[in-house]
Amino acid sequence: MRFIFLGPPGAGKGTQAKKLASDCQIPQISTGDILRAAVSNKTEMGLKAKFFMDKGKLVPDEVILGIIKDCLDEERCKDGYILDGFPRTINQAIELSSLLKEINSKIDAIFNFKVKDEIIINRLCGRRVCKDCGALYHVEYLKTAKENICDHCQGELYQRKDDTEEIVKKRLLVYHDLTSPLIEYYKKLSLLKEIEGEGDVREIYKEIKAFLEKN
Ligand code: AP5
């Protein structure tokens, strides 16, 4: 089971990918999470990536492709994975396709999460993340039992640096310009399943599961 989760920032890719990964016992490969870990560990790649991430821009393809190549070679990915937030440019998609051909593998389904820009701004400005386990919350829609404390691991919550209104608007411009053309690209390959991402989190998950059971 090899999936791609496509969609604008804040569309709910991470929220749904975490559930599906846990249900299917496959890893969630989030390029954003990998980059943030590199930033916090102050690695050479992290320092390079930070410059772009802080501005809401995409990190150069060669950095991202190196990350993906390394991940797909790992033992934990041999029975499947969810690519969350990759590919994000046509060039990344083309490179992924050649990489998969080389290792005689293929993607089984691509889920495209559709959410309007104004909803995204509200979601991302209110998003909070557990600094220990990465669980996702929202100050209005998904509150923790204790303020700022993760329900799962009691870790402290934080707000991502790129979740300010100014940067979210820049990320949305980048999405419309460079990432949204992937929708047509993957439609042509008949692999795309459109997901209405504005509904209830549990209902969206049911739709994903129902699709996978039928296909
Ligand atoms: P990344 O971390 O991938 O960020 P993103 O794509 O901008 O996506 P998000 O994580 O912000 O949103 P999401 O769709 O996962 O939504 P979530 O489930 O959290 O990338 C960050 C940066 O890294 C990029 O800007 C770029 O610089 C770089 N980068 C990463 N990958 C790259 C690549 N391939 N190429 C180049 N650069 C790359 O949900 C959001 C909020 O909404 C949460 O609070 C959640 O609780 C809430 N929510 C979720 N679903 C619902 C719902 N149905 N109803 C109400 N609220 C909901």
Image (cartoon, rainbow, N blue to C red):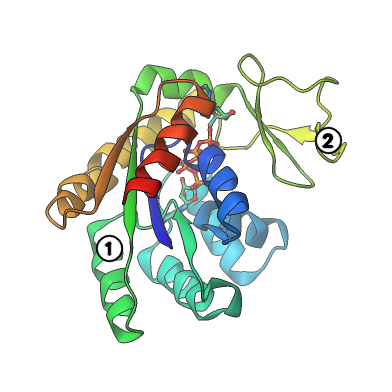
Which quarter of the figure has residue 46?
bottom right
Q: Amino acid at mark 1?
A: Ala
Which residue is nearer to you in this view: 59 or 83?
Answer: 83
- How crowded pointer 2 is (Cα within 10 Å; few <14, some 14-19, many 20+) is rated as some
Q: Is residue 208 above or below residue 79?
A: above
Q: Position of residue 16 (x, y in %)?
A: 52, 40
Task: List x then y, in percent, for residue 198.
Answer: 40, 22
Residue named by callout 1: 93
Q: Is residue 181 visible?
A: yes
Q: Give the crowd class for mark 1: few <14, some 14-19, many >=20 residues within 10 Å.
A: some
Whether residue 78 sits left or right of residue 132 in the image: it is left
At 51% from the left edge and 76% from the top edge, which residue is drawn? 78
Give the side of residue 94 with respect to residue 208, left or right.
Answer: left
Regarding mark 1 in the picture, which secondary structure is present there? helix
Rendered residue at 36%/40% (across/down): 7
Q: Is mark 1 within 8 Å of ligand 1?
A: no
For the residue pair 125 and 48, the one nearer the viewer reads as 125
Element at badge 2? loop
